Image: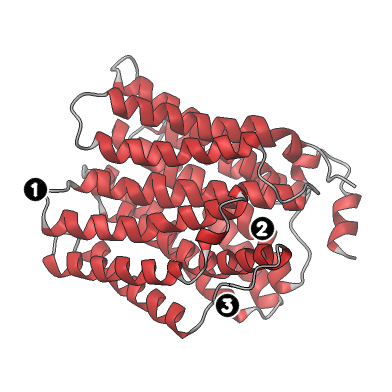
Amino acid sequence: MTSAELIRRWQGPALFSYGFRPFFLFGALWAGLAMIIWIVALTGTAAPPSRFDPISWHAHAFLFGYLGAVIAGFLLTAVPNWTGRLPVVGWPLTALFLLWLAGRLAVLASARMPFALAVIIDLAFPVLLSLVILREIVAGKNWRNLFVLALLVVFTIANLVFHLEAHWGDYPAEGLGLRLAVGAAIMMIGLIGGRIIPSFTRNWLVQHKRADLPVPPMRKLDKLVLLTSIGALSAWVVFPDARLTGVALIIMGVAQALRLSRWKGHLTTSEPLVTILHVGYLFVPLGALAMGLAIIRPDILPVPPAMHLWLAGAIGTMTLAVTTRATLGHTGHGLHADWATTAIYGAIIGSALVRFIAGFWPGHLLFDAAGLLWCAAFLGFAVAYGPKLLRARKA
């Protein structure tokens, strides 16, 4: 049976006919809803009944809630292409999605249930997802992608550490679990982005008969940059305040910027669907440079705005770049950014930049503006792309 035949045999909602559909749609809805809850919490009107303090809940909702959904949607769609095996569709996919949803509700109301129960419910989804991906990689003998699985396992362990830090009375929003999750996410962007960005850019430039093409993916320089990034991020996870860590992050930032410059993003400005991949990746070196400076000279640049160049910038922008492109391609639509898609990109870039500036600006005005732009980006994705994700693929 082919993947297409398996999908056609599914008689339920189109939403569960492929992995990207439920996780991209509801991940975006959750990103917007969680931000609204966070803004309300900032006003002091109400706070979620969670064991996490409001700031830690906000960080957990984004990293392990939204980003966890996008990672699942991407891997459940990409792994069948990597391994040549059939995708997870129908009732198994529905069960995975319901586990993810249960995790969001458990964390949101964790103060009203036993600690262990909330942790088990929340971790059930990433653990099961990891096992599914492991099964597919082993069955397909796709050993080159074991590193992606390893990063997913690290991401899952980070979630557990985040819960334990809250249980022990620590402050998870500045803890080991958060740094471990962010480090894993940045390495996923470095690894997967380093494959797809030059490839998609090359395809687009060839279609437009441009002779100046990007360097093919995963050359020697790319591997050296990734090794440098692993070292710098590992140092940041373990020794976040060490001066040498700051130096290592600055070296990582320079190396990642050099890597990005070889992909010819400046030639793609007439197609936002391609350009946004380069813009999203640009936040990886910018975040590394900013975080390195924040460690060495915190009097010049505080850590929170530097961190958000990675969080809202790299992770927020790259995930929207990938979800919009993958949705268009897998639902039978042309790979072109319409006005709504371009507006979504503008909103997420604006949110990241405004949040960075808010770290130096008194009051909550810019924080609120960044949050509203964030909601516009993700709820805008749900409105613009929801119909595509809810309907069967175009003929």
Q: In this figure, which residue is indicated by the disc labeled 2?
A: 76
Q: Of marks 2 and 3, which one's residue comes earlier in the chain?
A: 2
Q: Gap in Å between the C-alphas at discs 2 and 3?
A: 25 Å
Say which label, 3 or 1, has the lower sequence index: 3
Spatial CA span between label 3 and label 1: 41 Å
Q: Quadrant of residue 52?
A: top left
Q: Nearer the viewer, residue 165 or 187?
A: 187
Q: Amino acid at mark 1?
A: Asp
* Secondary structure of the residue carrying numbered label 1: loop
The residue type indicated by label 3 comes to Pro
Separation (CA) of disc 1 from disc 2: 44 Å
Residue 116 in picture, x, y percent from top left? 40, 44
Q: Is residue 296 above or below residue 325?
A: below
**Mark 3 in CB contact with mark 1 (< 8 angstroms):** no
Q: Which mark is residue 299?
A: 1
In front of the other: 372 or 102: 372
Q: Earlier in the sequence, mark 1 or mark 2?
A: 2
Residue 175 location, x and y as percent? 25, 51
Image position of 93 with respect to 360: above or below: below
Marks 3 and 2: in contact by CB < 8 Å?
no
Judging by the rendered image, the residue that carries numbered circle 3 is: 216
Report if residue 23 is visible in the image.
yes
Up/down of 55 relative to 280, above or below:
above
Q: Residues within 10 Å of mark 3 (few under 14, many from 20)?
A: some
User: In the picture provided, is 337 more to the left or to the right than 283?
Assistant: right
> Could you classify mark 2 by the number of other residues whose Cα lies within 10 Å: few (under 14), some (14-19), or many (20 or more)?
many
